[in-house]
Image (cartoon, rainbow, N blue to C red):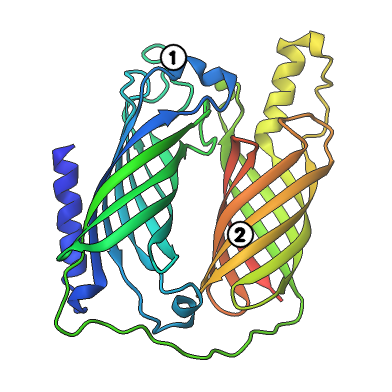
């Protein structure tokens, strides 16, 4: 653990060595005392102790040099190194590196942090050595943190205080079964250090023009690999073809409406397996594994970055896998006015089905 912390601090020091004003940086150390949620009945045996979440954070302040900074009340952006100790031998520990945004409200006293990244688990599922860890089927994990905090950045000279609550979600996105994941609610306390200078930055205020765009058509291809909940069936590729319209309401928000078809090879393997292993379920081995869904969504634009949430419903659903409704949370990066890349987590309730990576065309 100590070696990893040292490496991270060295990396942060190199990043901070770039030319920038002294008072544009915030360093934080925080600790969260958590409760592991029983988000489904299968993880009940893992809810046996209170996890601890230790975070080292570097943030860079913004002052309005770009429009998205002004539109979102001058947020921070940066990186967080997070260590989760489950205090449970079965689950082990998680180490994750996340990118984050901090958004401010109530005269910059209330902070909303949204962080997303990846890491590894020290004790994943193993059929012989660790069969009880159904939360992580692989060492590689994805991690998401959403937190609300009350902050005082200059409570004592350059030092500040931060108190809040957060939800920490980790899973491997069904890259490899099993994948129940974990959800932790934490109560956090932290110290911050924000060096000041004799000439502090001033926030740029500018009257920006309203954004008005016609309806656009989007074509999007997503793909990846995932696996069935039945451990022995292995990893399989999947493909998703989506077409949808979007309408930009203003600089920050767009709404979406569309349809998509899913080709999930793991479902094909699962159907074949169940038809043989569980004949009492009367599953025809030739049951179509494809699904067709309709969805509506919303997208927040943060410069060239888009944060989207979608809710969908399968109108073609020949094989009953999880629920008929699904959701998606993801990010898009706009390469130019027409092309974009995307990454998203598709889920049914609290159960992730896949991590989707895609490329799209906006016409």
Instruction: Establish if 322 lies above or below 68.
Output: above
Q: How far apart are marks 2 and 1 (CA)?
A: 36 Å
Instruction: Establish if 163 lies above or below 226.
Output: below
Q: In this view, does 141 lie to the left or right of 224?
A: left
Image point (70%, 31%), residue name:
267
Q: Name the residue under label 1.
A: 131
Picture disc at residue 4 = none
Q: In this view, does 283 lie to the left or right of 159?
A: right
State the residue in front, 353 or 204.
204
Q: Residue 37: where, in percent of width, then height?
A: 49, 28
Rate crowding at label 2 as few (under 14), some (14 to 19) or many (20 or more) other CA atoms within 10 Å. many
Rate crowding at label 1 as few (under 14), some (14 to 19) or many (20 or more) other CA atoms within 10 Å. few
Q: Residue 252: where, in percent of width, then height?
A: 59, 73
State the residue in front, 118 or 325.
325
Please say if the residues under marks 2 and 1 sit with CB atoms less than 8 Å apart.
no
Check the picture and name the quadrant holding the C terminus: bottom right
Would residue 190 be visible to someone looking at this image?
A: yes
Image point (35%, 25%), residue name:
50
Q: Name the residue under label 2.
A: 308
């Amino acid at each position: 653990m100590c070696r990893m912390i040292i490496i991270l601090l060295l990396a942060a020091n190199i990043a901070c060595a770039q030319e920038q004003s002294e008072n544009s940086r915030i360093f934080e150390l925080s600790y969260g005392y958590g409760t592991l949620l029983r988000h489904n009945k299968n993880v009940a045996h893992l809810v046996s102790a209170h996890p601890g979440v230790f975070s080292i954070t570097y943030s860079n302040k913004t002052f309005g040099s770009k429009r998205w900074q002004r539109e979102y009340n001058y947020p921070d952006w940066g990186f967080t190194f997070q260590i989760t100790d489950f205090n449970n031998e079965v689950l082990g520990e998680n180490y994750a590196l996340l990118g984050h945004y901090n958004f401010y409200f109530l005269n910059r006293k209330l902070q909303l942090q949204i962080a997303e990244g990846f890491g590894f688990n020290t004790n994943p599922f193993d059929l012989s050595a660790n069969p009880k860890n159904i939360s992580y089927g692989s060492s590689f994990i994805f991690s998401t943190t959403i937190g609300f905090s009350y902050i005082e950045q200059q409570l004592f000279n350059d030092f500040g205080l931060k108190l809040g609550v957060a939800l920490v979600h980790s899973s491997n996105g069904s890259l490899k079964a099993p994948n129940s994941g974990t959800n932790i609610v934490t109560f956090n306390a932290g110290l911050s250090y924000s060096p000041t200078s004799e000439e502090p930055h001033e926030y740029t205020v500018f009257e920006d023009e309203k954004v008005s765009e016609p309806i656009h058509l989007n074509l999007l291809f997503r793909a990846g690999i995932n696996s069935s909940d039945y451990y022995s069936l292995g990893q399989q590729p999947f493909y998703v073809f989506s077409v949808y319209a979007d309408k930009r309401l203003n600089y920050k928000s767009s709404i979406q409406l569309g349809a998509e078809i899913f080709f999930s090879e793991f479902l094909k393997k699962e159907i074949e397996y169940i038809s043989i292993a569980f004949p009492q379920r009367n599953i025809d081995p030739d049951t179509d594994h494809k699904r067709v869904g309709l969805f509506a969504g919303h997208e927040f634009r943060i410069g060239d970055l888009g944060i989207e949430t979608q809710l969908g419903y399968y109108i073609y659903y020949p094989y009953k896998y999880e629920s008929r409704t699904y959701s998606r949370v993801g990010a898009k990066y706009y390469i130019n006015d027409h092309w974009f890349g995307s990454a998203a987590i598709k889920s049914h309730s609290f159960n992730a089905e896949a991590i989707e990576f895609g490329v799209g065309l906006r016409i």
